[in-house]
Image (cartoon, coloured by chain):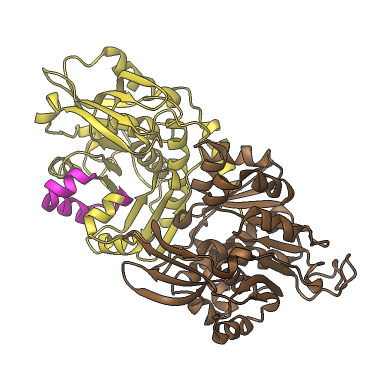
Chain colours: A brown, B yellow
Amino acid sequence: MNDGMTEAGACGATRAVDIWVVGSIGIDDIATPVESRRNVLGGSVTYACAAASFFARVGAVGIVGSDFPEAFVARYRSFGIDLTGLQRAPGPTFRWSGEYAADFINRRTIRTELGVFADFKPELPDAFRSAPYVLLGNIGPDLQEHVLNQACGAQFVIADTMDLWITIAREALERVISRVDLLMLNDGEARLLTGRHNLRECAAAILAMGPRYVVIKKGEHGAQLFSKAGLAIIPAYPVDAVADPTGAGDTFAGGFLGHLARSGRTDEAAIRTSLLYGATVASFGVEAFSLERLERLTLSEIEARLTELRQMMMIS
Amino acid sequence: MNDGMTEAGACGATRAVDIWVVGSIGIDDIATPVESRRNVLGGSVTYACAAASFFARVGAVGIVGSDFPEAFVARYRSFGIDLTGLQRAPGPTFRWSGEYAADFINRRTIRTELGVFADFKPELPDAFRSAPYVLLGNIGPDLQEHVLNQACGAQFVIADTMDLWITIAREALERVISRVDLLMLNDGEARLLTGRHNLRECAAAILAMGPRYVVIKKGEHGAQLFSKAGLAIIPAYPVDAVADPTGAGDTFAGGFLGHLARSGRTDEAAIRTSLLYGATVASFGVEAFSLERLERLTLSEIEARLTELRQMMMIS
């Protein structure tokens, strides 16, 4: 963080983190056309916190069950993630299993078992309350709202969402959207939310709901950043061999917000640059299952690939 | 053209054009979710020549039937297209009719009537033979080869192709590919041609067939330029309202090669810049049916949108 933001935030409590992330923590079974893996660490908090940790101090807000392996907790710690906001409850951890089609993009959910996640009531640790950067990961919008109400130092809030909430919790979702600085969603979700097809029209409709920025993710085709001022095109890094795309959107969001926190800025130029960082970290993440690639990733690898990506975009 | 290339080419004859384009000329019936139009001027030569004409002197090599309206010939002339290579034959002009899905991307062919195109034997006018830039538009690879054999001044040859030729004329297509400097095709065609899914692998396989460059088109998601040196990402301009995507690939190719001819260069930096011009001209082309948008397009509109596109790509 730059010096403009003091360590003791506006809310009194000492600030332990620059960013906090709320969302799901899960144990996943994943089948791709190439490989299948069982019982891998997953969830939006997992991917986003790991990605953000390369750039800033990040705290996790989530829930796990009594079956959650200590080895997974150790993996969070290896990224330096603050686990003060991690709740443990009796019962099974949230589980998801899914299968990818031959294109490594389309997927179907085989099973979802909510476990302790069904009764998740996120509570923000005091030491997180004054953190300036907030990522409301993909959980029910009522929970996003509940935890956002506990934040008092938030200066830049982003929310992710998914088709399920657009369909079943639209009112709460609209309340959340009206309160965030940036909404991140994929192209299909943007169309579902707005009833429009053209992404520029989708973005205009979402901006009219309140946020200053909308990022529409298009997977391997990159992303677009919309604001009232216009549009920015963010490319995806063309990955040689995708092993598992699960969590790519969360990794993108986490890498983005991590870098934005490192910059200490919230202006559009910083947002554009940080989105390129998010895209770069996400491109590493999909090269292996779970956090396996991020665990052996270095900041200098990120910088090298970012330079490569910039060169791919270079037009004289 | 720059001064490095003399007007009298290597082949003796005076050079009338900088570029020639061979391909189809057709009369199309097109249905989109918004509007349907009958008897519109179409074909790869039509779109590519019109797009190239903004930047360089371009000649058309194609065939039309006795029913081809004089008004369509006049439209070619309004772009300054050299029609020395336009054959007229007794019988009907090639006709295509197609219908677009709700996404304005997927389409089905309703009817194809070859007419005089069935016996097309392209002949290159003497005044075209020494032209340095050549676009082999989407026609049978045997015809592409036949006409390429007549070119003696070609310094940069690009070929377009389609799934049909990959399936039914693979040997001839491979011969053509081995002789061109740049192959342009869409992502689905690249996968069909190479049997690979990952576009980087597709491109590597195509480069191994001979060309120095491969451009893989991804429609609204832009394009990628591959060479042995690496990869460049070319964005698409996000069009507000697509009226008719027919011919977008040909417009892209024509605008690209036209600008490359204007630059007088064939190096990768010039190719990247010219691809951005191609993308920009194509983004105008789809705003109306047939050549209707290109007919009222100005070079300063192209430059303004190109500047806008560059700003969308700008990351500090």
Left or right for A231, reference A155: left
Q: Which residues are magenta?
A: B161-187
Please check the rendered image and state whether residue B172 is part of the magenta-colored stretch, yes or no.
Answer: yes
Mark yes or no: residue A211 visible.
no
Q: Position of residue B288 (x, y in %)?
A: 43, 25
Left or right for A17, reference A32: right
Determine whether A206 is above or below A157 in the image.
above
Q: Position of residue B189 (x, y in %)?
A: 27, 50
Q: The N terminus of chain B lies in which quarter of the figure?
A: top left
Q: Residue visible at 37% across and 29% down? A: B50
Q: Position of residue B54 (x, y in %)?
A: 43, 32
Secondary structure mostly seen in magenta is helix
Please check the rendered image and state whether residue B18 is part of the magenta-colored stretch, yes or no.
Answer: no
Determine whether A6 is above or below A160 in the image.
below
Left or right for B132, reference B220: left
Determine whether B305 is above or below B206 in the image.
above
Residue that protrudes farthest toward the front in the picture: A90
Q: Residue visible at 53% across and 36% down? A: A195
Q: Nearer the viewer, residue B237 or A73?
A: A73
